[in-house]
Image (tube, rainbow, N blue to C red):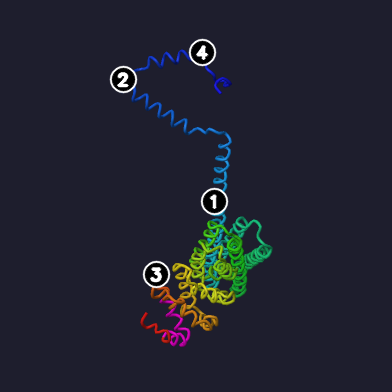
Amino acid sequence: MLRDSKYKQSKSSTKHYETLFNNRPCGPIAIRYTRAVEMECMSVLQGKSILKHMDKYAINSAAIRVIIQILLDIIMLFHSSKHGAINTIRNESHLISGEFSKLYKSVNSEKWKNVYPYTIQVTCHIRSLIHECNETMPNAPTYILEQQEVVMGECAKLAQLVESTAAKSDENPSRIPVVNQLTFLGQAFSRMVDLSLGHLTQKIIITLDEANEPPTLATAMRTIVTLGLEGEHMCYIIAREGGVRALLEICRTESLEFAHCQALRALATISCVAESLFEIEKEGGVETLIEILCDTTVGEKVRGEVAGVIAQITSPCLENYQQMSDLVDNMEDLLRSLLESVLIVGLASTTESYEIFLLSSAAIANITFMDSLGCEILAQYEAQGY
């Protein structure tokens, strides 16, 4: 190898290095430093790649890791952007609602000097929000664009009406036409905001339907939980756009077992509105929950999340909770699943987790409020001793 190398040394240079080696310092200190340098050289040599084709595989695996990380970052950015866009629309719409309130009070008290500047403020803010919506939704569906045009038309009508009314301030103009126009604009604006939030939420739910990778699903479900915690209106939109169906489908899919716990937590979060209860019953969600509870192979943590969903959907604080016929029809199986799971005693009596114990107890207590049959079933199973 050295003979063919372009870096081969001449005889004179070789002799020169031999002379230096023979004349090197001696003694314990010199030997210690020589050994240190030799160890350092050995470390450097061991860090070198011996086979060039091995470098190719190392580079490929490193590239794959980089690509995977980039994809994960894109997924996180996608969901954070959708969540950020939803928050932007909600926050701006709340500000505009406050401006609407000021404008309405001025019109109602016939303070026409304040009405015109408030009108300009509201209409400009609405135009700004529409522009921001178009930036966050570059390919918005036709029905949203049409609703935006309706809102812009109502803004133009309001501005024209207020301008003409303010010119007649000396003639005691009627406030009724302005109030009516404010009502029309408010309704059109609310519908535009609702459609925009629904469209952005759909994108997240599509991810729940199509994704199979743990990071993607986990990010989407975290977004659902975060949005659900922001208020009942967002829970209503998530349920309306198919969020309940998508989460139940995840719970039914064995290959997505890693996501069952988080899906149930998300389902419990958004099940605080009547729309979610209707969707759970429509999609056969009660049977799915009972099936998970009865399955002894399912971990306690997952069954505890099921108990949390049942405690939520049977809460007396919710409207229409007593109209869930599936709960009444399956009450005995549901209580038996909570109290006993085949041969072992159920969650409420065996769990070592206080959180799961409380959720199970709350679910059992709520079920007894739904129908007196619940108390009879508990007495039948002698649940007083649990």
- What percent of the width, then of the height, locates residue 355? 39, 69
Q: Earlier in the sequence, mark 2 or mark 1?
A: 2
Q: Earlier in the sequence, mark 3 or mark 1?
A: 1
3D distance between C-alphas at marks 3 and 2: 72 Å
Where is mark 3, residue-wise?
A: 355
Q: Are marks 4 and 1 in contact (CB under 8 Å)?
A: no
- In reply to whether residue 136 is colored magenta, the answer given is no
**Amino acid type for the residue under numbered disc 1:** Asp
Q: Residue at x 31, y 20 (%)?
A: 27
Where is mark 2, residue-wise?
A: 27
**Which mark is in front, 4 or 1?**
4
**Amino acid type for the residue under numbered disc 3:** Glu
3D distance between C-alphas at marks 2 and 4: 30 Å
Q: Are marks 2 and 1 in contact (CB under 8 Å)?
A: no
3D distance between C-alphas at marks 2 and 1: 58 Å
Q: Earlier in the sequence, mark 2 or mark 4?
A: 4
Examine the residues drawn in magenta and state their main secondary structure: helix
- What percent of the width, then of the height, locates residue 187? 60, 71
Q: Earlier in the sequence, mark 3 or mark 4?
A: 4
Q: Earlier in the sequence, mark 3 or mark 2?
A: 2
Residue placed most toward the observer, 198 or 323: 323
Where is mark 1, residue-wise?
A: 73
Q: Secondary structure at mark 2?
A: loop
Q: What number is the disc on residue 11?
A: 4
